[in-house]
Amino acid sequence: MVTVKKLSMVIAGAVFSVSCLGLKPVNASHTLEGDLPHRESTRSAVEDYLIVPPDPNVEGYYEPSGGLYNILVDSNQTGTSTLFNFIIPPGGGTVPHTHHRDDEVFYVLSGDLSVLLVNDDTEQTLTGGPGSFVYLPLGRPHSFSNNGTETVSTLSFFAPGGIENFFRFIGRPKELGPGGPDFTYDNIVQQYPEEFASIQFSLPVTLPGAKDFVVVPPEAQVGPYTSLVTAQQTTGGRFSASVLSLTSQAALPPLTQSSKGEYLYVLDGGLTVQLGDEIKDVSTGTTVYIAPNAPYAFTNQGSTPAKLLSLSVASVPEPSSWLGLVGVGAYFGASWLLKRKPANLKN
């Protein structure tokens, strides 16, 4: 007999992998009709820059299996993508599922995250600690779980954006707490059957033409620049990701962002960021979103090294092409595909 916990995990995995519902992949979607007060975004499009400092009160929602999904930047602000901070309690996670519209990224900030990667007829479960990077492409079955005793915190990036509206719909605002025994996926589906009838639940099957998984362990992220995933490795060239490390007083001269947007997340240390005519100091845990065609520069004016994660949306020259021009140098970390066994990720 299937237990209530297993049933809720199955439903969680299904609803987590919402399909595109016929919308073009470059557009945000998942907006559902109805009267819930926390259903839709109240955020406005970002015309130039957005700074999101570490804030325990940032908008977030509990889903019935216990995860807390904090929305750092949403698709109303970018038009292209969404950045979350996922908090996954011990025992939390999803069952295997396949996204039909979203490319997904995990960058582990704390704790140990286990990720099941399904590649055709093979399965591999990898567990990675802080600094582990996993690219989960559209069309590849996968799941994630926290099998440890410590809460897991991740940066979670989705392109295209829009899935945050789904969590706004099914979730419980975090100021209300995780919810009681009646807060279940089964109850939500029964309460709003017309909403869930319109969603095509994804099955854990590999879609034709799906890209490969990419896993990059922390020890591969060395030197001033590490490519985590290139645009060529993502579905339709949607984005690229890299880690930049700056020694004390190192600087990147002004650049003009020519893609559909750039995210900078400070992993360690602090940076002075020039955003147009403004200069801002940002610290560990801060997200900076830079709108298309907005100039920026950053400097590490501190006495210790600084490290940041960069996510460049859509087609944009790989950072290796301009890092050499500005004298920062480049050291390319290996991009680990599923066929290569990462040294720090445990089976």
Image (tube, helix red, strand yellow):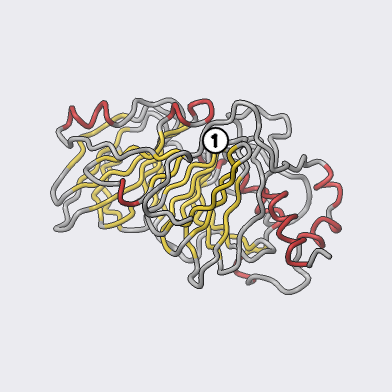
Q: Name the residue under label 1.
A: 79
Say left or right for 204 vs 310.
Answer: right
Residue at (54% x, 31% y) in the render: 211
* Nearer to me, 310 or 33: 310
Say left or right for 75 vs 303.
Answer: right
Residue at (19% x, 49% y) in the render: 300
In which quadrant of the rendered view does residue 19 lie? top right
How many neighbours does mark 1 have within 10 angstroms: few (below 14), some (14-19), or many (20 or more)?
many
Q: Position of residue 89 (x, y in %)?
A: 56, 68
In which quadrant of the rendered view does residue 48 lie? top left
Name the quarter where the N terminus is drawn: bottom right
Residue at (78% x, 53% y) in the render: 35
Q: Where is residue 259 in the image (x, y as percent from the top left)?
A: 41, 28
Is 323 located above or below residue 266 in the figure?
Answer: above
Q: How many marks?
A: 1
Is 13 located above or below residue 262 in the figure?
Answer: below
